[in-house]
Amino acid sequence: MDSTDPVRQLDAVVVGAGFSGLYMLHRLRRLGYDTQVFDAASDVGGTWWWNRYPGARCDIESMDYSYSFDPDLEQEWEWSERYATQPEILAYANHVADRYDLRRDIQFGTRVTSAVWQTDPGRWLVTTDRGQRLSARFCIMAVGCLSAAKRPEIDGIDSFAGPEYHTGEWPHDGVDFTGLRVGVIGTGSSGIQSIPLIAEQASELVVFQRTPNYAQPARNAPLDPGFVAARKADYRRHRELARTETHGGVVIPAPEASALDVGDEEREQLLRERWEAGTLFGLLSSYNDVMVDADANAKVAEFVHDRIRDIVDDPAVAEKLVPTSYPFGTKRVCLDTGYYATFNRANVTLVDLQETPIEQIVPEGVRTTEKVHELDALVFATGFDAMTGALLRPDIVGAGGVLLRDKWSAGPRTYLGLATAGFPNLFMITGPGSPSVMTNMMVSIEQHVDWIADCLAAMEEHGHAVIEAEPDAEDAWVAHVNELAGFTLYPRAASWYMGANVPGKPRVFMPYIGGVGPYRQVCDSVAADGYRGFSLGPAGSRATPEAVRA
């Protein structure tokens, strides 16, 4: 297709065919919209299509990490484990795509390379890497928060003689490490999940750790049929609680006491119960001041430090695995299966990069300031350019020719995490400034998709063609997001929440920390008040360069 080919006319283009894009397509069809979805992968699943590394599984319980929009769907699907593995989650995504016949409106193996707003006639001109051009009234970014894999900045990274793998771009036919000397760089979630399984195969495993991470046991197990039956019988009430009355989109009792107002023995008992329960938010929600009071946080951190020392046999290795440079929970706490115990294996070596930094990757392995670690295979468990990386990959050009990446050069600016001023009819699902990664993503995805679909229906009803976030509303929301984050301990960590894992990326706390229930109330209030903070009108009614504030 070349520039002389006709431009296909659509109501909406959706970028991404993960859980956000699938549900968005389903809702747009109900509106009667002619919609095209694009995804670079060869099938549905989003992050669960790409992330196939050993041990990949969700850290939200499977019966919560699922759609709630169709009671029949949630009744018919059967999860096998408490925490579903990547293959089972991908099977679920495929089941959803089949059940609602979604693939006929999805083009795979295709990246959107640009989206340019045309004030007159008030449409997005979208271009793909296949040379296709499409004109759409609305452009909806469903690209995911953790979908732009990030390689480390290490000299000689392309000089290694053996195979290199990134956990976020894992070969679909798997990797056999049997008998190999393997190096893993990174001890975030994907490293913590994959290291125990790689250690079982490798003849030697060298783990290169820059900053130790907090992990707590998942206590994963096959789901009990009695529990499944009881949950399904109560699913509607449970889902409503998750949507409206919780902080993170999972149902867990709200803490009432301070960690500093109870005795050491009582606190130890509760923390042990939460440790043994194996839930992501268990320790974080043990007391009401864990994430806002440094002294309270230190009590929980000390408990976890002691558990690490209990598990790891070598005291020197244990101390290297104990995080001390940031408060507990300010980097995403990982759920693990045997991570710390893996360092008791004779074939596993921990290299503390604070003591002996990596100087260079060389053909034979990894050279630190101490020595060359000779390796046969190298794994980068170095995470993602979170929350903004995938959004800023295409050239998104708004009013007056302003690039989104230029507008966000000092950090992302959105209104409600749904829209950004100067970019009319552009929506983001779980964008920066929304609860997103601080929550059960499925709850946040559904809330965003439903809000966007309801907004489009209201626009049709009232004859509006264009909707655009107002700069003042955006400024106020950005200030509110930052103010809430400032009340917490989160900004004290150099985390991917802050963009700190990407050199040169602005250090801004990107998610909204206020919780899914309060956030939903704000979004509902905005809609009920005639979409307060948005300008609505006919094509060409706004979309001026003055709407963009860097």
Image: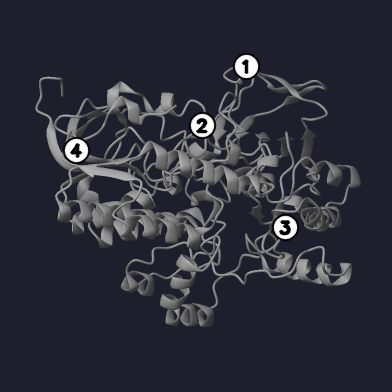
Residue annotated with mark 1:
156
Quarter holding residue 520: bottom left
Q: Earlier in the sequence, mark 2 or mark 1?
A: 1
Left or right placement of residue 250 versus residue 533 in this view? right
Quadrant placement of the N terminus: top left
Q: Earlier in the sequence, mark 1 or mark 4?
A: 4
Left or right placement of residue 530 versus residue 447 in this view? left
Residue annotated with mark 2:
411
- Up the image or down, 296 lies above or below 544; here it is below
* Disc number lying in front (2 or 4): 2
- Up the image or down, 469 lies above or below 154; here it is below
- Tell me if residue 107 can be seen: no
* Disc number lying in front (4 or 3): 3
Q: Which amino acid, by three-letter code, is at mark 3?
A: Val
Q: Which amino acid, by three-letter code, is at mark 4?
A: Ala
CA gap, disc 1 and disc 4: 44 Å
* Disc number lying in front (1 or 3): 3
Residue annotated with mark 3:
290
Write the residue at 54% across / 73% down.
223
Helix, strand or loop under label 2: loop
Quarter holding residue 135: top left
Percent x, y for residue 65? 47, 62
Q: Earlier in the sequence, mark 2 or mark 4?
A: 4
- Up the image or down, 76 lies above or below 207; here it is below
* Disc number lying in front (1 or 4): 4
Write the residue at 78% across / 63% down.
259
Percent x, y for residue 69? 34, 66
Residue annotated with mark 4:
136
Q: Earlier in the sequence, mark 1 or mark 3?
A: 1
CA gap, disc 2 and disc 1: 30 Å
Q: Which amino acid, by three-letter code, is at mark 1?
A: Gly
CA gap, disc 4 and disc 3: 46 Å
